[in-house]
Image: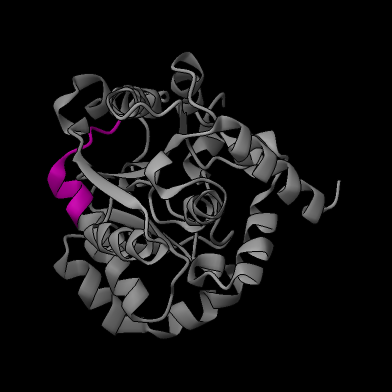
């Protein structure tokens, strides 16, 4: 099915839903879903909800507020407390399940209080290729993924977003900061803050698509392969900044940036 037919299908899904709450991170996928929904349904039948959490960079919350305001939709911020859940903090391979279970349970409650029929998340078809235990929580609570239902991939989200003139069309993929910590390593606020500060350094140097994988005093930097040479050229300046953050050893992954690289060891 072509991308335009998929878009028609997505609009039908949204129209038939009649009303919805959208889990809104402000990333490319959720921005696209919220925009399309705002064009299909009356504004009083939509609420975008963003979670404010220690596991997400604060700058993303600011961005989400700006995007939602630009679409003219109701936007609610809720605080989530994953670090109070010992199961999440222990960082098992199904860590995301506990996070999403808390989030979606709260979103269902908010949707009910506002008489909205469905909770939508912005998972797309491409997400199915990665290990995502959070999808179990989504299915248990009846959260719908309209982009998946319409068969839309990540690349198609970007194509359609660009046609709509959305600034998020080429926004780098987001993932919670806990995804930088190897399974079994305890998650803590200081570690999350260190990772965030390190990634802010990289973005400030122009590496917008990057990850800092955390291994106590060692980190593994991922940038697209085409950017590896440029990263290495940063040399001592980059090393000094990372050492100030507490990384004694700074390494570069020669395989380059890829989503879910910490999942590569599962089952080995």
Measured as percent of width and height from the top left, residue 199 is found at 32, 64
Image height of 69 relative to 81, above or below:
below
The residue shown at (59%, 39%) is 14
Say above or below: 161 vs 114.
Answer: below
Which residue shows up at 30% across the image and 30% down it?
114
Q: Which residues are magenta?
A: 184-193
Is residue 185 found inside the magenta-colored segment of the image?
Answer: yes
Residue furthest to the top in view is 140
| Left/right of residue 248 with respect to residue 131 in the rendered view | left
Camera-side residue: 111 or 83?
111
Tell me, yes or no, whether the highlighted magenta stretch contains residue 8. no
Figure quadrant of residue 233: bottom left
Residue 188 showing in the rendered view = yes
Q: Quadrant of the N terminus?
A: top right
**Furthest residue toward right:** 1
Name the spot of residue 189 as percent of width and height, x first.
Answer: 14, 44
Image location (x, y in percent) of residue 36: 56, 53
In this rendering, the count of numbered labels is 0
In the image, taking residue 167 as reference, residue 87 lies left or right, namely: left
Q: Is residue 248 visible?
A: no
């Amino acid at each position: 099915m072509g991308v335009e037919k998929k878009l028609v299908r997505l609009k039908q899904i949204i129209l038939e839903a009649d009303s919805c709450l959208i889990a809104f991170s402000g990333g490319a996928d959720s921005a696209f879903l919220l925009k399309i929904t705002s064009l299909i349904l009356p504004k009083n039948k939509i609420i975008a909800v963003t979670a404010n959490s220690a596991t997400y960079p604060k700058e993303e919350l600011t961005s989400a507020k700006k995007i939602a305001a630009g679409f003219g939709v109701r936007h609610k911020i809720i605080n989530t407390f994953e670090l109070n859940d010992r199961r999440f903090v222990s960082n098992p391979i199904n860590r995301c399940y506990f996070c999403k279970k808390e989030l979606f349970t709260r979103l269902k409650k908010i949707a009910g209080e506002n008489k909205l029929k469905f909770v939508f998340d912005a998972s797309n078809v491409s997400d199915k290729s990665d290990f995502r235990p959070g999808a179990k929580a989504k299915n248990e609570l009846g959260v719908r993924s309209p982009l998946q239902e319409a068969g839309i991939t990540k690349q198609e989200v970007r194509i359609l977003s660009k046609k709509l003139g959305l600034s998020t069309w080429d926004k780098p993929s987001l993932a919670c900061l806990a995804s930088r910590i190897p399974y079994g390593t305890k998650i803590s606020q200081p570690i999350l803050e260190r990772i965030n500060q390190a990634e802010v350094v990289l973005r400030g140097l122009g590496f917008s698509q990057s990850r800092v994988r955390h291994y106590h005093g060692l980190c593994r930097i991922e940038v697209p392969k085409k950017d590896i040479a440029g990263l290495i050229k940063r040399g001592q300046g980059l090393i000094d900044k990372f050492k100030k953050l507490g990384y004694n050893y700074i390494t570069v992954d020669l395989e380059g940036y890829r989503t879910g690289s910490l999942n590569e060891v599962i089952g080995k």
